[in-house]
Structure formats: structure tokens, C-alpha cells
Image (cartoon, rainbow, N blue to C red):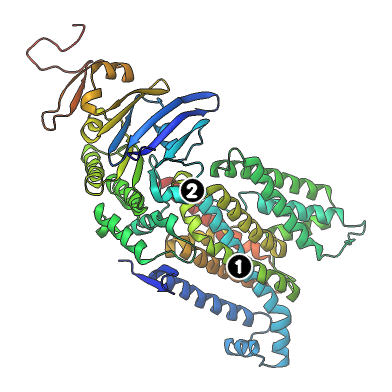
Amino acid sequence: MRKYQNFRVFKEKVSFLVDRKALTVVILLLLVMAGVFIFSTGTGEMRISPINVVKVFFGGGSDMEQLVVQSFRLPRIIVSLMVGIGLAVAGGILQGIIRNPLASPDILGITGGASVAVVGFLAIFSDESNALTVSIQWLPVAAFAGATIIAFLVYFLSWKDGVSPIRLVLIGIGIYSLMKALTTLMMLLGPIYQASQANIWITGTVYGSNWSNVAILVPWILVLCVVAFILARNINIQELGDDIATGVGSNVQRYRFLLLMVSTALIGGSVAFAGGIGFVGLMAPHMARRLVGSSFGALLPASALIGGILVMIADLIGRTLFSPLEIPAGVFTASIGAPYFIYLLFKTRNG
Amino acid sequence: MNTNQAISTKQLTLSYGDTTIINELDLEIPKGEITVFIGGNGCGKSTLLRSIARLLKPKSGAVLLDGEAIAKLSTKDVARKMAILPQSPSAPEGLTVLQLVKQGRYPYQTWLKQWTSEDEEKVNNALEATGLMKLKDRAVDSLSGGQRQRAWIAMTLAQDTDTILLDEPTTYLDMTHQIEILDLLFELNEKEQRTIVMVLHDLNLACRYAHNVVAIKDQKIYAQGKPEVVINCSLVKNVFEMECEVTVDPLFGTPLCIPYGKGRCILKQERLSRNG
């Protein structure tokens, strides 16, 4: 039996129905996230015990520990966490408005748009000796712009008396294929060195993250997550179909646009700093659905935490397993994600 | 404006692209009664219902709800007066009955105010009325067809509107569940005087439950009124293009339509065929 708790304050000006099981799951996930965060911070060339890691967070620990944690590990771990959260929430929103559990940031071509922009950026702004003619700081900007432009393109091409989920998916898949082709073409035409650079980016990596990345990414992702959470009940209603949503008085097209923009901004921000880390946006909401059910008030926070945990673990494996060789985090999300995707397809077919 | 009309249409024209479905229709739907749209496949009865529910924009003309044009009302205001249950809706995997029914409260909610005592009361009433209280924590997709349809009806009840529109609420249900759903709607009308407008395929059930039938043919109303007054052989012949005999239901006294055609005849008397 599901247990619910009424939450009403300020003369019912604020009132929610809280699913206790979902709340418990979210709290547990929060603890797991904190655990992974601390463990990951302590793991690497130099091992630091979890207790010392916490000490370092509060200004303690040796100078060496301070240096390793603060300069090398923390920025990339925070970026992993944020990117995981961003992609997972965006994936959850997309699965809701498209009403299909197989929807993900990749399928709509949004990450593809970012890839083209990055490969194009590397091709255009490199001189003959393969050195960039502009600062690498502009790469995230290019990625973000690519993602946003493609999202708008998909949206407007899908428009016909409003945007229907099925048109969105079909146009999205078309654009996605086009972007893939463009990326391959540009990589083939460019010098080998760039191809390998671009490939690492396309796979997705948080290598080389720094505090200025963190300073941009953290507020960006967190603010958008709050917006997404506020919009949760509009995702819930869209999941029942356009007719039902219109029937209960929801402005379907307005919220669909708004929700698409929120997910685009989340995806844009994530790919800008970590490249095309795949499958997180597909897997995390799915796992969350298993744990907390289909209501987005619980589904979004649970997906966010699962996404964060997945990318943190993927990066941890990537930087330790074959050390000193760095494997992009995207390799590991894909290696869990691909079998999971096949499992999903298999289950849907037999379901 | 006549206050006995829950809904009326003025010169309503509906079309899909260049194909006109309904042409300059003036229709009045009485308050507090059950009205059923009947007609052959593709006659536009569902389209008409959808346009009344503002799911489809009219090409011209207007739909009036309590005398006001719905196109001019805010969509949330309309949602507090009129609920629509479209044909075969589907719920996401794992969504529970309570979570579904709760969403009927959408037009009363804001993002901070999502579960007031009133919301709780209306949702509980809806669950009681549909007999789903015990199933409220079950996933909608794990229910039987009849229970699932009741869950959707509960959601529209939670919307707490005077008028409820339903597009073929009994499709895909077996006979037991068809009667169960129609009994439920009939009771809601009897007890709470809710105006119910629906599309039904089964003419005999329409005659039994409706106070008022609207027969649609060739983009307009062929006939409208009490089933016992308007349903007869010539109506069925013209609207459904079917030969039949209309007799009286031995249990309810409402019109009962028995189609001619082929089939086993075990009566001793002459075969009941118009030609033979």
C-alpha cells in the first residue's frame, strides 16, 4: 500500500501530496550521491580516506591533499555531477512531453547539433600546425549555440497548427541523422589530429574541467532544475495526451515550448562542458521511474540524482581503471547504456 | 440567453482541411440531461463533441457554454465548467489511479497549491462514486478495461464540472462493463444533475440512457429529441442506412432497434425479411 502525507501550510496557500516512498527513495539517492562524491574525491593516484576528504572540504587536511582535491579532482567531479543532473532531467522532460520512454536528448538531434558545432569550431579555428587560433574557452559557447540552434530548428520544422509529439520525434530523428553525417564529413575533411580531438569531445569527457566551468555550470543547471520542478505538474498532464491536457485547461503548446526550452538549455549547458555523454538522459529517468513511479514531482529529483551518480561513477572509472590513461566518461555511460537500451527495446516489444 | 441550455452552437462549421464535416450547425444541449450523439461512422459526431470541448477549432461559428463563447473564456475557466473524456486515452506506465484522478484538479491548482482539503475531498468523492477507493494505489495500466475506464471517468469527476463530455466511453468494453459505465453516468446525472453529453455507437443503449438524442447526418442534425419520439424505422434507415424494425424494449419500454439482414432464424413463422 502506498503511503501519502498531506503537506499543507499557510492556510493551504501551499499544499502538496507527498508520496512517502518516493521521498524516502530521493533521500536515499541523495545519500548515495554524497557517498559517491566523497569516494570519488578520495580515489585516484593519491588515495585520501573519506574522513580526510570531508576534512579537506571544511578546510582541513594536508597541503598536498588540499591541492589534489581542490585543483584537480573537485572541479571535474562537480562538473560530472551537474552534467549528469542536467542530462537526466532533460531526458525526463523529453520522455514526458514526447510520451515515449525511449526519447532522449540524442534522439532529438540536440546533442548532434552541439557535435557539429564543436567539430566545425575545431576545423574553422585551427591553423596549419593544428593550433587553435582562438581560445579553447569558446568551445563550450560553440557547443551550446549548436544545441540551441538545432533545438529551435527541430521545433519550427515540427510546427503545424502546434507541435505534436510524433512530429517532434520524426523531425528530430531526421535532423539527428543529418547532424551525424555532417559531423563525419567534417571529421573526414579535417586533419587527423582534429578528428581525434573531436572524437573525444563527441564521446563526452569531463577531463580538464576547472573552477570557472563549475562557476558557470552549477547555477545554470540548478536554476533550470528548479524551473523544471515547478513545471512538473504540466509534464504530468502532457503525459496523458494533448486532448486530456487541453480538457483540464492546460495551455499545451505554451508549456510544450517552455519545457523544450528548459531541456534544451540543460542539454546545451551539459554538452558545452562535457561533450556528448550519451545514454544518461535515457537511462536515468527510466531507472527513476522504476523506483518512484510516473509522477514528475518525484521522478525529476530521482532522475537528477541517478544521472549525477551515473556520470560521477563513469568518470571515476574512466580516470582510474586504466590509469594513467584517461578514458572519456562517455565510453562508460555508453557501455552501460547500450545494453540497457537493448533491454528496454526487448521489454517494450514483449510487454 | 435561455438558461436551460448548458451548451449551444451557433452556425458552427467544422472541417479537416478542405473537407467540411459539420456545416453551419445550430444545436442546443439541455442542462441536467443526458444527451447522446448518434450517427454512422464518419458522420462527424466525435468531431462535433471535440469541437464543443475546444479540442478542435471551428472553421467558423461558435460554441457557447452557459451563454458565453468558449473561445473567449480562459481555458482554465472552461475546464472548471466542462470536462472531456476523449476516446481511448492512455496513461503512462506505472501511474496510479490516485495520481491520475488527482490530475483532474489541474484547473484549480497552482504550482504551490496542489493538494488543498477541497482537492482531497473532490478526489475522494470521485473515487467513491466510481468504486475505485480500494484500487487507488494500483497502476492504471494493471487494471481491467472497465476499471481503467472508471479511473478516467473519476478523473473527469474530480474536475468537478457541471457538464461532462465523453467520446465513446464504452468502446472496447464487454457488455457487462458497458452497462456498468453507463449506469454510473446515469446515476451521476440522477443524483447530481450533471449534464452529460456523449457519443455512443450502440443505438439501443443510447435509447435506454439518453433523455435526448441528436442524430447527425450529412453535416447537420437529422433529428433531435426524446428517443421514444424520434427513433423510428425511417430515422435508422436514413441516418444509418440500415433496414430495421423498431419495437419496445420489454424491460425498459424504450425504443429497441432490431436490424434486418442475414442470420439464423429459428422462428416457425415466415422469415423476417423485407424481401422474402
Residue found at x 27% / y 45%: B146
Q: Which mark is residue A311?
A: 1
Query: Of the numbered discs in the image, which one, if any, rests on residue A55?
Result: none
| Image quadrant assignment for residue B121 | bottom left
Q: Residues within 10 Å of mark 2 (few under 14, many from 20)?
A: some
A261 left or right of A141? Answer: left
Q: Quadrant of residue A201?
A: bottom right
On what subunit does the disc labeled 2 rest? B
- Amino acid type of the residue that numbered disc 1 sits on in the rendered structure: Val
On the rendered structure, is A226 left or right of A238? right
Secondary structure state at the residue bearing disc 2: helix
Point 88% across, 62% down: residue = A134
Look at the picture and state if A269 lies above or below A317: above
Residue B139, given in percent of the width and then of the height, sits at 35, 56
Residue in front for this viewpoint, B220 or A129: B220
Residue at mark 2: B75
Does residue A94 appear to the left or right of A19 in the view shown? right
Amino acid carrying label 2: it is Thr
Q: Position of residue A252 (x, y in %)?
A: 53, 48
Is B47 left, or right, of A149 in this rendering?
A: left
Residue B130: percent from the left, percent from the top? 26, 51
